[in-house]
Amino acid sequence: MAGPLPVGDPMPGDGALPDDAVIDAHTPFSVYLHVPFCRVRCGYCDFNTYTATELRGARQDAYADTLLHEVRLAARVLGAHAPLRPAQTVFFGGGTPTLLPPGDLGRMLGGVRDAFGIADDAEVTVEANPDTLTDDVAAQLRASGVTRLSIGMQSAVPHVLAALDRTHDPANVTAAVSAARRAGLAVSLDLIYGAPGESLDDWRTSLTAVLALDPDHVSAYALIVEDGTRLARQIRRGEVVAPDDDLQADMYEYADELLASAGYEWYEISNWARTDDQRSRHNLAYWRGADWWGFGPGAHSHVAGTRWWNVKHPAAYAQRLGAGLSPGAGCERPDAEAARLENVLLRSRLREGMRTDELTAAGRRAVASLIADGLVDGAAAVGGRLVLTLRGRLLADTVVHALTAP
Ligand SMILES: C[S@@+](CC[C@H](N)C(=O)[O-])C[C@H]1O[C@@H](n2cnc3c(N)ncnc32)[C@H](O)[C@@H]1O
Ligand code: SF4
């Protein structure tokens, strides 16, 4: 969702899929609901999110109702091709979904349930800011069908949080995790490493704090300097030092070692869980190429080999739906070659890996030298699977480049 929207074909006004799109009843269906509001914008973030002064008349209090128009449109569009499939996973992402009252999130979830059904054992996640999670909010979310919270902890060290413009007090993370647990919600903690001024010792402090909180799941992302952000401008002006690749690599290795010693296994380059059941089924659906509909401004969707994306601004989004039109800004149908490249890009990041016979002949030839360089697991390759080593995870872009070279 970051950066400008892709350039694709125009989207039909009614949001229809191509006439010949064939929906496979056995492909799992997932739902993403974007909530594009934040109290303040963090300097490093280029997600499609807006503070109160940037809303240009779009109303946060009307957002749930606006989005429910798109839910009904989706049911019409998909229902024209095949019986509707219940959602196996639902994910409220942002932005800051918990800036909306829990009743609004519950109504959106109810709309998805009415339109598609939600599987009995569905995973339903809400991204939450530690400052916005009380016992009452957690209990209301659980009562409306939410099963899991992804809490944006980022760091346990005050000067690192300050460098990231994060406004929460580290103590609030502990309170948020306790509130989630009391309500019966699973907990994932999100971390960022490599912030300006963050040392390996600071990172150790954050990881130790994470383990003390005993979450079900951990995500840790290297800080990326996105073009157009305040962080990028500060680095360009020399006010802030850019993240150091070698230090970030050391931080990744340290995280993997510490998390593994506490029983958290990596299952995707930036994600760790104790058991298969605790992995993010929603993110696995993206990586495995399932079908999903992304609701909300700037959200992307993928159904039956067609991709599309919505207009970015919440005011434009509300205006399109208010006029009875699809909020889709563009669409594309990747050809077989583009779909194959994407498959390698996504699946090679997973511990389950991908089948080597899905690679081209050139890709399969590259595997031998990637094994020799210590980037790809030789034993897994003998069994016909492409799985990255620890070194390969650190150099994943290089590996994908080699695997997809003509
Ligand atoms: C976009 S946020 C949405 C959830 C919530 N607003 C928050 O910040 O916790 C989801 C996650 O994306 C990650 N993220 C956003 N921008 C990033 C960047 N430039 N580099 C690395 N991680 C980033 C953060 O870890 C964050 O927890
Ligand atoms: S709170 Fe999350 S979505 Fe909002 S600006 Fe910060 S990182 Fe981005």
Image (cartoon, rainbow, N blue to C red):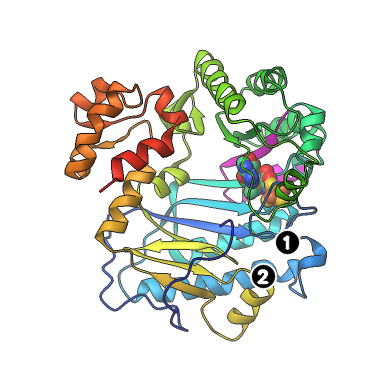
Which residue occupies the foreground of this view, 382 or 308?
A: 382
Going from the N terminus, do you reach mark 2 or mark 1 first?
1
Measured Cα–Cα span from mark 2 to mark 1:
8 Å
Q: Where residue 62 appears, x then y in whole percent?
A: 72, 71
* Residue closest to the eye, 86 or 347: 347
Q: Is residue 80 magenta?
A: no
Numbered label attached to residue 97: none
Residue projecting furthest to the bottom: 323
Residue 28 visible within the image: yes
Location of mark 1 (residue): 50
Examine the rendering and report whether any part of residue 142 can be seen. no
Locate the N terminus by quadrant.
bottom right
Quarter occupied by residue 57: bottom right
Residue in the image at 68% along x and 56% along y = 228
Report ligand 1 position as a quadrant.
Answer: top right
Magenta residues span 136-155
Q: Position of residue 186 (x, y in %)?
A: 58, 35
Give neighbour class at mark 1: few <14, some 14-19, many 20+ (Cα, 10 Å): many
Disc 2 element = helix
The spot of residue 353 in percent (x, y) is: 32, 34
The quarter of the picture where residue 177 lies is top right
Q: Is residue 348 above or below residue 335?
A: above
Identity of the amino acid at label 1?
Tyr
User: Which residue bears the numbered disc 2?
Assistant: 314
Amino acid on which the number 2 mark rests in the picture: Pro
Q: Is mark 1 within 8 Å of ligand 2?
A: no
Q: Relative to residue 127, is residue 74 drawn left or right?
A: left
Q: Residues within 10 Å of mark 2 (few under 14, many from 20)?
A: many
State if disc 1 and disc 2 touch (CB < 8 Å): yes
